[in-house]
Amino acid sequence: MSRRAFEVMILAGLALGTAFAIRNLLAQSTSSRDRVLVDELVLANRVLAHEIGVLDAYGHVSVRDTRNPNRYYLSRAISAGMVTAADIIEYDLDSKPVSGEPSAGYTERFIHGEIYRARPDVMAIVHCHSPDLIPFSASSVPLRPIYHMAGFLEEPVPIFEIRAAAGLTDMLIRNPELGKALAQTLGPKPAALMRGHGAVVVAPSLHVVVGRAYYMNMNARLQREAILLGGTVKYLDAEEAQKTGAQDGFERAWDYWKHRVK
């Protein structure tokens, strides 16, 4: 064998070894993610955007890693209706990506990291800018459960006032400090309004948070319509709300929405 042929063989072997190493690293990175959970999160993005209209070009949904409570999954900064599995980023509770560049993520990812840190019971979070909810975030009229599907709403639904936490800002949750302040306003409740901005909804599962986000929006719409009719509005009694709030975990709704987007 000539020296040149030997050198070519060695270089080919090194290239092949490098390729195998890269492939193994990618496989390890992929296998470290919960693929089923990632696929469900992609579906939740599509349902919230295309089927039930909670998310538009902005807003986002995340899910905590069931195998590691100190990690969560959230898409890179694109519109929810466009999310694929390749767009999902794994974060720690400091809202730093486990791999990749922080610049790829949503500016307001700190909403998710700080709520997960403060609320070990929360497994999924939606942040939306629903026009049905924003009037209640800026009005003295409180959002109250009027609809049996929204019995999970606890009175009063708290309102986050960013001026109390940081003065005059661009209204966005841009850092951990603002994320912590929002988490404090949310407290143990399932949802909070954000004055002039939108809302945050939390739940013990991805399916439930999607259901809560939808029916919270629906309740706001119905409450506004009832108020416009005039007269006295009859809201759910506290015991009624407690009895209706759980529903079936919104599983029937989830199956329906999933079927529609697929």
Image (cartoon, rainbow, N blue to C red):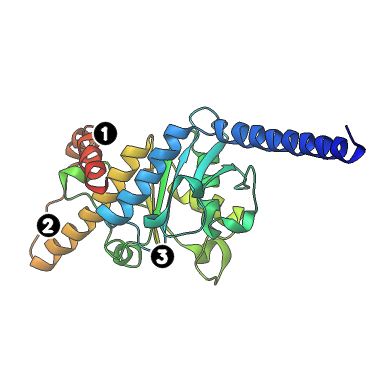
The residue most toward the front is 1
Residue 181 in percent (x, y) is at 53, 53
Residue at point 41% right, 65% down? 197
Frontmost residue, 53 versus 100? 100
Residue 129 in percent (x, y) is at 37, 62
Q: How many numbered discs sit on the rendered protein?
A: 3
Q: Is 72 left, or right, of 145 in this rendering?
A: right
Marked residue nearer the N-terminal end (3 or 1): 3
Residue 197 circle label? 3
Residue 245 visible: no
Q: Which residue is mark 1?
A: 249
Q: Which residue is mark 2?
A: 233
Amino acid type shown at disc 1: Gly
Q: Quadrant of the N terminus?
A: top right
Q: Quadrant of residue 31?
A: top right
Describe the element under mark 3 as helix, strand or loop: loop
